[in-house]
Image: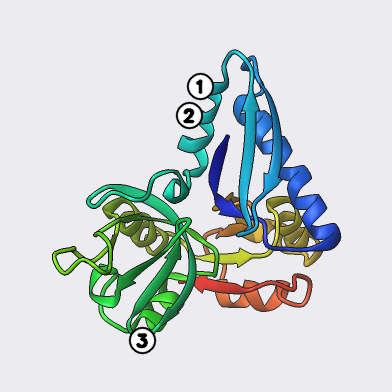
Amino acid sequence: MVVLATKCYVEGDARDRALDGMNSLVANDVGDLDVDWQVGVRDDDFVQVDVTGEDATVARNVLAETWGEVVAHDGGLEAGEEYVGTLESWDDVGFTLDAGVDVFVPADELGLGVGSPEQVVERFGLVQHLPMRFVYGGDAGDPDAEPSRLADAERDRLYDWQRGDGRVNVNSATRGETRATVNRAGHAQDIVTVERLGLLEQSIVCAEGTDPPGLLAAIGSYLPAEMRCVV
């Protein structure tokens, strides 16, 4: 079994479509290996994949590398090690990530420039449930523990977003649904691709000359989801 660092938090038909899509993604990742698998969702909405077969260990490693792995329930987090959690909330003092347990990243440890956490969210187009890499500082109850921080690779990724031609980040939609929405709104020519960030978190990469806020306004009525621009 491997618990992936991505969540399925929608309900009804949308949940069924998302899990069908997740099953196809797992097939793309490990379908050439000698394994069987079953995709499910834990009570905390993290996607769980049960893997059996001769290549099960290899398959679990591939899925963990591709999606990130939630390990907190398998022995806890170790100080100084890098993990993946999902962005659950933010306030004046920092980010709260869900890595199987809540991990607090203080504002001073975001490493994403000046401004409050709310301003960082707006500037980098962050959406709830976005998978993010972090370095665990230690148990908050330990007076000698270091604060947790965003990983260098995560900071680099977000700064790279700002160096491009702009993005519109989306949650609560699959990659296929996001692509279809852009096409339905008549803006297929205005994007380069839809980059998958998680199962239900996507990044619409704008083409040169496309105005991200304008694109968001154009597609917003077609897609009932949280959306933010990276300009």
Q: Nearer the viewer, residue 10 or 115?
A: 10
Residue under numbered circle 2 = 61
Q: Are marks 1 and 2 in contact (CB under 8 Å)?
A: yes
Distance (Cα) linking label 2 and label 3:
37 Å
Residue under numbered circle 1 = 58
Query: What residue is shown at x 63% (from left), y 51% (from top)?
Result: 199
Q: Are marks 1 and 3 in contact (CB under 8 Å)?
A: no
- Secondary structure at badge 2 equals helix
Distance (Cα) linking label 1 and label 3:
42 Å
Residue 213 in the image: state x and y as whole percent: 57, 77
Q: Residues within 10 Å of mark 1 (few under 14, many from 20)?
A: some
Q: Quadrant of the N terminus?
A: top right
Residue under numbered circle 3 = 92
Left or right position of 179 against 98 = right
Left or right position of 83 against 131 = left
Q: Amino acid at mark 1?
A: Val
Mark 1 and mark 3 lie on one chain; the one further toward the N terminus is: 1
Residue 20 in the image: state x and y as whole percent: 78, 43
Query: What residue is shown at x 24% (from left), y 59% (from top)?
Result: 137
Q: Nearer the viewer, residue 149 or 230?
A: 149
Q: Amino acid at mark 2?
A: Asn
Distance (Cα) linking label 1 and label 2:
5 Å
Q: Amino acid at mark 3?
A: Asp
Residue 43 in the image: state x and y as whole percent: 65, 57
Mark 2 and mark 3 lie on one chain; the one further toward the N terminus is: 2
Q: Residues within 10 Å of mark 3 (few under 14, many from 20)?
A: few
Query: What residue is shown at x 32% (from left), y 83% (from top)?
Result: 93
